[in-house]
Image (spheres, rainbow, N blue to C red):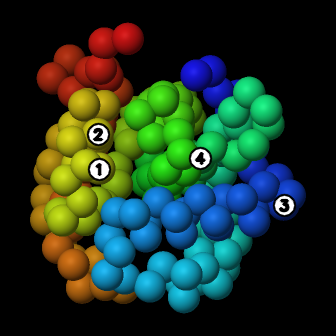
Amino acid sequence: MPYTLAPALPAHRPAMAQLWVESWVKTLPEIDFEARRPWLESHLDDLAAGGALIRVALDGEGAVAGFVVIHPGTGYLDQLAVAPRVWGQGAAEALMDEARRISPALVALDVNQDNPRAVRFYEKMGLAIVAEGENPMSGRRTFRMEWRGGDAAQAPREP
């Protein structure tokens, strides 16, 4: 399914928050992500105020299918979320391509180790595990993953 990538607008925020909650509930149902919705809202505001760019993937009907938040100066990808209704349909790949376009030298992120679907996806997209850590909010173990532009060993997946 083709997606249109666009800067996130205030009108997109409710759909972004909803798909973020839905995707996390499906991934880690033991955590109350609905209770974390207000945190996401303020976190997105803080990230944008700090220079991060927020892009949405819009489906053919103009509905928000996913979003990515990346800081072009640091290459840190803070959020990538896709609505479960479009999992496996190319939205996450389109958003990762956009992240690499915005930050062509480096894309770095932290991913929960107990989210193997996400770890496999990022590996498929050419990111490598470079360190381990801990999520300060949940206490869960994380991997720091990075993609560096121009590094043949971490080239993006084949089309």
Q: Residues within 10 Å of mark 2 (few under 14, many from 20)?
A: few
Q: Which mark is residue 66?
A: 4
> Which of 62 and 44 lies nearest the eye of the viewer?
62
Instruction: Report the amino acid beneath label 4.
Output: Gly
Instruction: Give the SS element for disc 3.
Output: helix
Q: Position of residue 139 (x, y in %)?
A: 24, 85
Please indicate, yes or no, whether residue 114 appears anywhere in the rendered image: yes
Residue 49 x/y as whole percent: 70, 68
Amino acid type at circle 2 is Phe
Q: Which residue is mark 1?
A: 118
The residue depicted at 34 percent of the width and 27 percent of the height is: 149
Pointer 3: what residue?
Answer: 10
Query: Identity of the amino acid at label 1?
Result: Ala
Label 2 sits on residue: 121
Residue 33 in the image, given as x and y percentages of width and height? 48, 79
SS at circle 2:
helix
Toward which corner of the image does residue 50 lie, by quadrant?
bottom right
Q: CA distance from mark 4 to mark 1?
A: 14 Å
Which residue is at 25% across, 31% downward?
Answer: 124
Q: Give me the C-alpha separation between circle 1 and circle 3.
A: 27 Å
User: Can you say whether 132 is above or below 146 in the image?
Assistant: below
- Alpha-carbon span between mark 2 and mark 3: 29 Å
Indicate left or right for 68 with 123 as reference: right
Give amino acid for label 3. Pro
Q: Residue furthest right?
A: 11
Dot 4: few (<14), some (14–19), or many (≥20) neighbours within 10 Å? Answer: many
Image marks 2 and 1: residues in contact by CB distance under 8 Å: yes
Of mark 4 and mark 1, the one earlier in the sequence is: 4
In three-dimensional space, the C-alpha distance between marks 4 and 2, rounded to whole angstroms, equals 15 Å
